[in-house]
Image (spheres, rainbow, N blue to C red):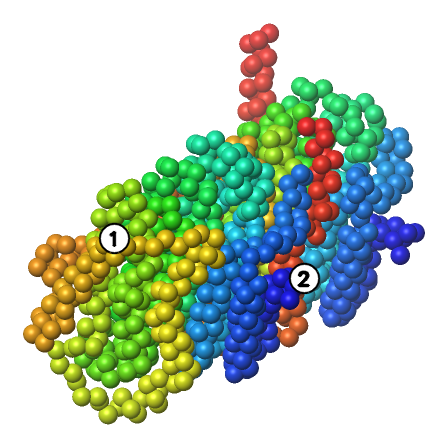
Amino acid sequence: MEPLSLILLTTVAPLAAFTLAILLLMQQPRLAQIVVIGGGTLSLAGAALLLFQGPMAPLRYLWFTSGDMQLRFGFLFDGISLMFGVAVALITLCVMVYSLGYMGHDPSKTRYFAMLALFEWAMLSFVYAVDLLQSFIFWELVGLASFFLIGFWYEKPSATAAAKKAFLMTRVGDVGLFIGVLLVLQVAGHFDIPGLLAADTGLVAQAKPAVLTMITLLIFVGIVGKSAQFPLHTWLPDAMEGPTPVSALLHSATMVAAGVYLMARLHPLFMGSETTLGVILVIASITALLAATMAMVATDIKKVLAYSSISQLGFMLLGLAAGSLFAGVFHLITHALFKALLFLCSGLFIHHFESNDLAQIGRRGGRRMRFATAGLLVGGAALAGIPPLGGFFSKEEIFAALGQDGVTIYSIVALLAAFLTAYYTFRMIFLVTRPAHMEQPAPEDHAHGHGRAEPWSMALPVLLLTVGAAIAGFWGSAIASGLGIGAAHHSLASMAPAVLVVIAGVLLAWMDFGRQSAARVGFIARIPALEKLFNNGWYVDAFYDAVVVRTTMLIATILHAVENKLFDGSFDRLGFSVLGIGAGTTRLQNGWVQFYAGWTVILIGVAAAYIGMGG
Amino acid sequence: MMGDLPVLTTILLCPVAALVLVLLTPARAAHVVRWISAASALLASVLSIQLWRAYDTVQSGFQFVEIIPWVQEVGISYHLAVDGFSTILVMLNSIVFFTGVLTMWDLETRVKEFFAFMLLLVIGVYGVFLSQDLFFFFLFYEIAVVPMYPLILIWGSGNRDYAAMKLMLFLLAGSALLFPALLSIYHASGLGTFNMILLAQKSFDPDFQIFVYPFVFLGFGVLAGLFPFHGWSPTGHVAAPSAVSMLHAGVLMKLGAYGILAVGIRLLPMGAVYWAPTFATLAAIGVVYGAFIAMRQTDFKFVIGFSSVSHMGIVVLGLNLAVLGTAGQDALNGAVFQMFAHGVMTALFFSTVGFIYDRSHSKTIADFGGLGSQMPRAVSIFIIAGLCGAGVPGLASFWAELLVFMAALKTYPVMGVAIIVGLVLTAIYVLRVFSMAFFGPVNDKWDGLRAVDLQGWQLLPRALLVAVLLFFGFFPRVLLDVIDGTTTHMLLVF
């Protein structure tokens, strides 16, 4: 098939589904679900066929001209976009099907499914974009769809606050990205991505090193916002206020991955600036470690997963910044699968027990839910990096990239973060599957109306993703060849440190939470100061509230006073004083003859005296 | 059909004819008045679309010229013509006119008088956009401004005496600056003509230009909501009835910006260049300042009013950057695009807020909560307008802001960064309204509104405006193609 019709099928199908659902099907939720899932299926078919056809020449269409600037929008079909496009379409479809069950009782189903379709359209259009401005546009629309989905239950103040926070914090990053994108235009005169990346005529050859550093740093600011890196990471845990399938889709596998994807997309530009790479290494390693410490103490299953997403995104950026495109993209794809799986499993627990609390899920019999538990184990093991599951191989690539110039501080930090990852993942697994004691299932659990614990619509995607997460580790060489890179083979010895830290992490989790006599309290509780620090998210949010939010509101208050008192006020005073003069002079005209006559005499007298003295 | 019909005069005659008919209609036949207004607005809209389509984007310069000498002794003639800018602004006026009439359909008090004044206002606006004679330009300008006073005073709400008076004094003060400036241009040219096309070819003495330009700029700038002379605008918005706010923010403020462009920059280019850095700074301050003030407002309409100050700052900034050369093309394209986009967006804002106010008799943001579940349609439409205001791509404003920001970054990098950072502020005040009024726990007090959400034909004007915003959000080329040639032509002298 023509690439044009395929890409239109991929991107326009969800848009059409969204439009239909929101305009016509508000009252027919069942039909809306069918339409949206149909759109998602067509989209996946299109993306898969595109991947099957392999890399192709990009398509470009004139979008507009302003003076001598010409914007051409279109689609780019290279290894990265083709592979990630399929991953996005696949996971979106899984989440849509899963939502049939999860959101089955929600009165606003149509709106929910429509927003999923809107998101899919924006995300896929972003992935295939050939033009940097086009990328930016859909990047923003992805953020918008995320805003609506986080705040889906808008009657909950916490959901609204979380949606607002996500929008504003990513906006802060987007301002950087926007300026960076505009600078690209100033330097290169166009936004065409293949043109910008061309080795001889691209941006790296054109721009002065300082300018290139500035541009890449600004783009990285956008990535920090979108991919929830330190210090703009705090919106992501809050975003868990959205429905759990949304968390699975946006806040682990796709939307937050957009930042990493953009860096992979523009990898040659980043490789052109040592300074930028240095900054990214620092930020990404801080994030990987910081988020892991917070995941260690979180009690909400979704929060654990959210922190782990932040941390794993840090890993991806570490791999990319260390120079390995393959490591970053490989981990992006394995993570997308196992994290979507983990979230969907957590959704099964939450849906069934109506609680997000790890310990409570465990006590009330989490492990009796075989399906969810199996998914949790496979996904958790992949996240922790247990061979031979997905996460192990992709993380191994990142370690290899970091260690290529000998052992650096970054490889040590990454190993430490990997150790903590294994620890917190198995803490989660043990808390759910090995509680100290289990309550007997309360009779009302069955009468609760959810019927079977896992309806087929929820079980099927979980099953599919379990298989995907289990085998993704073996796709390394396929992904490498898709990127046009030969896959490196690592010796067992070089894998040893990674394996060892994982084993250590799992063992420590077993000691703390797994074994029968375990206290089920983390080792970190012995250092209360640290535990408090982790529990409070290193006080980043507290800092924002105390400093950033307050300062902004203070400026607004001051300016508001200035407006009322000074600008507007002085014009009012001017107006009112004119009125005052008028009112004053009106009093002179009181219609009292004696008053007029009196003044006449006085004034004539004064005039006569004046003339008399002067003359 | 465009061949022999004097299309510009016909467009102008639509509201004129409607005004005459409305005045002849007895006051109790309110429905006849509404239908006459709607029909004339529809006809004007159709003709505006025809004009847009027939406008030749390749040929630069004025098109559809109609000249009838009037007072030959002093060189006044009835002279209509359009360039790319006026073509799209005429379209904007038609859109706001048509949707404004539909928005006021339910008005019950003094219907005849209301539509008469509104038609008068619309005549003035068309006249300004079409006139190429300085005398008529100013005449129409005053015709557009004056009906605001009775419209706010009689049909307004809240502190309307104060608002109407304040608005009138500010605008007349602007006119007081303009009138001597325009006369001095006429005299200094020595041509003895008010023909703006001829005046534009004359190069005035640079000192004269530098002296007169601020009068023209500030005189028109007041109407464009230029900081710090913006105070009349939010106050006026709040007190005015919906359609008047729509016309006021949607097209009237554009008259100010268009005046700066058509009289200031076109006739006094050297003066414009001389003053551009100063006025660009003023406009950029307005962009950020307006956003900050909007964050502290408690009334829906005040938020929109100050957002207009901020967004019109982008227009005026673009106009000033245009003459500075480095990125003039983008700046001017962006400024004109923003005039159109902002016009449609504020019309949508006020049309929707007006609707919510009509139903609830409250404009106080904190009065509401969870309104999204009570009036899902009205709220969705307001949200779209808000997102457009926040510069979200996919809606028309994005392109306008993109072009102006691009130019600002190139011309004055620090200022450019400052106003792009201002985008976060915009998002803050927009989201603040969303989360306080539309989201959050439902306020039972307004449960009665569930039955009276937008329905049937009430959706029409709002849906139309949304469609326009989305269409140009995705196909900016349709608009840019019309204005780009005129921009190039206009910037030749710089």
Can I make out residue B419 in this image?
yes
A56 vs B197, nearest the viewer: A56
- For badge 2, the amino acid type reads Thr
Tell me what residue is drawn at x 40 percent, y 64 percent.
Answer: A475
- Mark 1 is surrounded, within 10 Å at the Cα level, by few (under 14), some (14 to 19) or many (20 or more) other residues, namely few
B357 vs A274, nearest the viewer: A274
Name, please, the residue furthest toward the right: B4
Q: Is residue B374 left or right of residue A343?
A: right
Tell me what residue is drawn at x 10 percent, y 57 percent.
Answer: A528
- For badge 1, the amino acid type reads Ser
Image coordinates for residue A443, horizontal then vertical, percent: 24, 92
Q: Is residue A589 left or right of residue A519?
A: right
Which chain is mark 2 on?
Answer: B
Query: Is the C terminus of chain A in the top left, top right, bottom left or bottom right quadrant?
Result: top right
- Mark 2 is surrounded, within 10 Å at the Cα level, by few (under 14), some (14 to 19) or many (20 or more) other residues, namely many
Image coordinates for residue B335, horizontal then vertical, percent: 62, 42
**Pointer 1 with pointer 2, Cβ within 8 A:** no
Query: Is the N terminus of chain A in the top left, top right, bottom left or bottom right quadrant?
Result: bottom right
In the rendered image, which residue does mark 1 sit on? A494
Question: Which secondary structure, mark 2?
Answer: helix
B19 vs A412, nearest the viewer: A412
A459 vs A156, nearest the viewer: A459
Can I make out residue B229 in this image?
no
In the rendered image, which residue does mark 2 sit on? B99
Question: Which secondary structure, mark 1?
Answer: helix
